[in-house]
Amino acid sequence: MSNDVMPPGPRASRRAPKPHKRRRGLKITLGVLLVLLLAGGGTVYWLYSQLDGNIKGVDIDKALGDDRPEKLPTSGQNVLVLGSDSRAGAENRELGGGGDVSGARSDTALVVHIPEGRSKAVAVSIPRDTLVTRPECVKDDGTTVPAKEREMFNGVYSLVGPACVVKTVEKMSGVRIDHYVEINFAGFKDLVDAIGGVTVDVPQDINDKASGLNLTAGPQKLDGTESLAYVRTRHGIGDGSDLGRIGLQQQFLIALLSEIKSQDLLGSPASSYKIANSATKSLTTDSGLASLTSLAEFARSMNGVDPASMETIMLPVAYDKIDRARVVAAEPQAGQLWKAIREDTTIPEEAKKSPATGG
């Protein structure tokens, strides 16, 4: 099929229930981890070597050294999840909107906090337009990039790489990142196509001329190309900013997880392999997770997390006083949020309020 996003024809699909505001938990890669958990079982384990070889690893610990926040005082963990809009390769360039665009940016970013006991989780979305102070970082070639104030968050990845994104998040939050997981454009599309599409309840008509996405309000079953356009649209909904898009991403990705869980993957080795192969081909992780065994073990450790109890919130932000097209972390809310995560305690309601959205 063409990668151009076409207006969907009539679809007969059951209306999907709207997720509760605090149940918009998982993002793309948490769904991927669930797939890997299933793939780690006996049904497709004989293909371990091929799947294992798909995963790319980054030695975050070596790149960052010892100047890092303390680990959590409990057995809880924090995972930085990035959705990368890499233009590397023809397929990624076309999915990213085409054109002569070099490098990559962290199009979607969230810190997933898994408290002690692993019966719930919180995902904190960091808006890509957030202005941050980028710390001094070392690139893969050994050159040092000096610190810079008022750097747009999604530009850190393209300028210095994933290790510097981790360091930036740690410096801005004081939260130790235990693991890093990244999935690219093509991987997202292939994963959705591998599971046969995802049904979402589109909250309003969307007509995004920038991406070509045209959807009518109501339940729609989206293929991989449409899904990618849906989670990336910013001109077709709300105020056209990244803040409005975050709500769509949260809604879609809980639907993605639900679709994965509803399929009898263990009863269908061929489907299990197809999904796991799509997922692992697009993954980059820290070296501690860069094997199928490690990923499956980590996914099993999260097996007790109930999606119904998961919560996704946005980092509290306010519009920048100099550049109203950008946002900055809102205080004291952001500080309270990060403090609760550092101490592995309940996040206070006040720390979830974002002046930029009036919530």
Image (tube, rainbow, N blue to C red):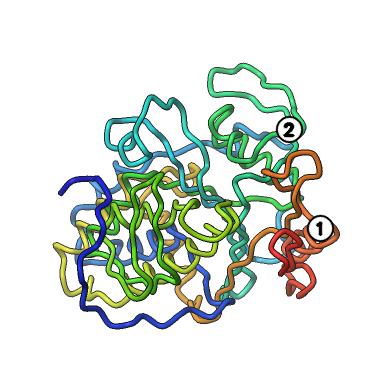
What amino acid is at disc 2? Answer: Pro
**Toward the viewer: 64 or 182?**
182
Residue 109, given in percent of the width and then of the height, sits at 56, 50
Left or right of 267 on screen, residue 328:
right
What residue sits 24% from the left and 53% below the top? Answer: 6
Query: Which labelled disc corresponds to residue 129?
Result: none
What residue sits 50% from the left and 75% below the top? Answer: 305
User: Which one is earlier in the sequence, the residue at label 1 or at label 2?
Assistant: 2
The relative height of residue 7 versus residue 310 in the rendered view (above or below) is above
Residue extending furthest toward the right: 332
* Residue placed under numbered mark 1 in the picture: 335
Quadrant showing the C terminus: bottom right
The relative height of residue 224 versus residue 130 in the rendered view (above or below) is below
**Toward the viewer: 126 or 346?**
126
User: In whole angstroms, how far apart are the C-alphas of marks 1 and 2?
Assistant: 18 Å
Tag 1–tag 2 contact (CB < 8 Å): no
Residue 72, given in percent of the width and then of the height, sits at 71, 59
What amino acid is at disc 1? Answer: Gly
Query: Which labelled disc corresponds to residue 135?
Result: 2
| Res 21 quadrant in image | bottom right
Left or right of 261 on screen, residue 161:
right
Residue 78, given in percent of the width and then of the height, sits at 61, 58
